[in-house]
Image (cartoon, rainbow, N blue to C red):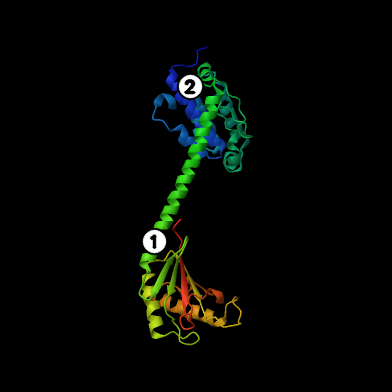
Amino acid sequence: MPEPRTDHDAGTELRAELVVARAAAAARSGDLDAALRELDRYDDGAVARHRDVIDLRARVHAQRGERAEAERCWRQLLDDDPRDESAAAGLARIRRFRRRGPVGALGRARHRLRPAVAAVLCAGAVTAATWGLTTRVPSDARAARSDPAAVARAEQDVRRELTEQRERATAEAAARRTEALDALAREVRTPGARVERHEDSVEVVFEQGLFSEGAELTDAGAARLVRLGERLAERQQLRVEVLGHIAQVPEAPTAGGSVTSLWRAMAAARVLSDASGRPLTGFAVASAEQRDAPHDTDAANRTVTLILTPQTAS
């Protein structure tokens, strides 16, 4: 019988060992896509053709339900070494799946067992229920894996990289949200209104009252709402909440809202809807708590405030 191919130098063995350890650690975390990316990390044909890299690639494809890709990888190993027991066992399992007519068993396994993909081991063995195969380790790969501490360090590197990637993604999302909120605050700044930038939203507070009595808008109040509504015309991906206010009355409840403040919110929403072209149903209206009145004078508190929250700034 021909001997297995051992045309990898020591550097290739070490690089292949690192690739396999990183990919296996990613697979253990349940991220099969990341495992495949790790297997493609180096633009090195010798590493890509390494027996352990190909075998782990086959196992990851099998876990993903990609039977044809797994079969292709294992056949490649058998072409190189007909005695490769792991590749033969993998192909045998695929043939059994076909004979049994599993009605998409591999596809089901992909979704059912993905959290259990911790079974993909850096030594090349898979212990998950679907692909519980024992791997024959070539002597050259055995030598490269003789240092468990090196493998453990590689796995720690992968976990650290994944954590750093998540942290970078979170920071980038926060930066995008900050940029979107800053842009929104600039766009809605109009005469007679104060814009307050919060962590997740922009608040518009009118400096003077918009209503004369009850829910009757003054001409100046209606004009201010029209100007703001025009600024909202191009901002369709935006949650707009209109909060109506009333003056605080001595010895009256400081919470619970009022019918008058709700009417004011509805009246303001109608004007904003007409000016912006947004449907009236695109505005959330509510009565603010009496204690949350934005001003100290009764006349100024005959008003509404707006809470604007970008829906795509994440």
Determine which residue is flagged by label 1.
182
Residue at the extreme top of the image, as rendered: 1
The residue closer to the viewer here, 28 or 212, is 212
Q: Amino acid at mark 2?
A: Asp
Q: Is residue 20 above or below residue 249?
A: above
Query: Can the viewer see residue 128 in this picture?
Result: yes
Above/below status of 126 relative to 65: above
Q: Which element type, helix, strand or loop, lies under badge 2?
A: helix
Q: Where's residue 295, x and y in %?
A: 48, 77
Residue at 56% x, 77% y is 290
Query: Residue 94: where, in percent of width, then height?
Result: 57, 32
Q: Residue at x 45, y 25 (%)?
A: 15
Q: Which residue is mark 2?
A: 79
What's under tag 1, amino acid-wise? Asp
Q: Which residue occupies 50% across, 37% down?
A: 160
Task: State the count of labels.
Answer: 2
Q: Residues within 10 Å of mark 1 (few under 14, many from 20)?
A: some
Quick one: label 2, few (<14), some, or many (20+) residues within 10 Å? few
Residue 190, position as x, y percentages in the image: 36, 72
Residue 268 sits in quarter:
bottom left
SS category of the residue bearing label 1: helix
Going by the picture, which residue comes out furthest to the bottom?
213
> Is 275 or 75 nearer to us in this picture?
275
